[in-house]
Image: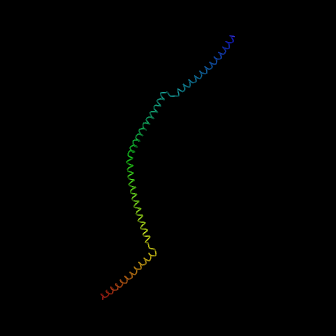
């Protein structure tokens, strides 16, 4: 019995040993491969010091750029603050000018309305007192007729006077 139990146990141990050895070999292969990968990666990657220097350079450039932008923003803010401080003065000047313009336009509008009212009143007076075309024509005919009659009379008087002067001249010559 002992031999059987020990034999079975030895065979089981041998199998386990062989499985352990195979697992160990496999692990060693993986470790070797990882070591090679790490060595390869180390040759392709920069050192920590180089990477830190790069980051510091980026940060320094960025900090310089941010400091310049901050200075420019402060200058712009200062200028805008000054402009804003002068704004009430400008606004009051504009309000005065607009008020003056409004007053002037109001006066001019009143004057135009008054003139328009006067014109309309005069127009209505003319329209109400306007003679018809026939009345106006009769007036013109009367005026010309009176004028023509007057001229005819004056011409007769002038001819008579001229004839008298011609007679007087003939008497003087004789």
Residue sitting nearer the eye, 111 or 74: 111
Asked if residue 8 lies left or right of residue 95, the reply is right
Residue 55 percent location from the top left of the image: 47, 31
- Relative to residue 164, is residue 71 depicted above or below? above
Q: Quadrant of the C terminus?
A: bottom left
- Relative to residue 84, is residue 146 depicted above or below? below
Display colour scheme: rainbow
Number of numbered markers: 0
Residue 108 percent location from the top left of the image: 40, 59
Residue 4 percent location from the top left of the image: 69, 12
Res 9 quadrant in image: top right
Res 158 quadrant in image: bottom left
Residue sitting nearer the eye, 1 or 47: 1
Asked if residue 32 lies left or right of residue 86, the reply is right
Residue sitting nearer the eye, 90 or 157: 90
- Relative to residue 66, is residue 34 depicted above or below? above
Outermost residue, top side? 2
Residue 22 percent location from the top left of the image: 63, 19
Residue sitting nearer the eye, 118 or 151: 118
Q: Quadrant of the N terminus?
A: top right
Res 116 quadrant in image: bottom left
- Relative to residue 51, is residue 92 depicted above or below? below
């Amino acid at each position: 019995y002992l031999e059987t139990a020990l034999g079975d146990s030895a065979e089981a141990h041998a199998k386990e040993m062989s499985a352990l050895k195979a697992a160990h070999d496999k692990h060693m292969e993986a470790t070797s491969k990882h070591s090679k990968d790490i060595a390869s990666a180390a040759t392709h990657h920069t050192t920590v010091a180089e990477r830190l220097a790069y980051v510091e350079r980026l940060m320094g450039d960025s900090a310089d750029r941010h400091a310049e932008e901050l200075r420019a923003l402060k200058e712009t803010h200062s200028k805008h603050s000054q402009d804003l401080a002068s704004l009430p003065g400008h606004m009051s000047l504009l309000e005065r000018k607009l008020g003056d313009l409004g007053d002037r336009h109001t006066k001019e509008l009143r004057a135009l309305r008054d003139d328009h009212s006067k014109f309309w009143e005069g127009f209505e007076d003319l329209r109400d007192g306007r003679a018809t075309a026939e009345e106006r024509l009769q007036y013109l005919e009367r005026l010309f007729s009176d004028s023509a009659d007057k001229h005819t009379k004056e011409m007769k008087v002038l001819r008579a006077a001229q004839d008298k002067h011609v007679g007087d001249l003939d008497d003087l010559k004789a």
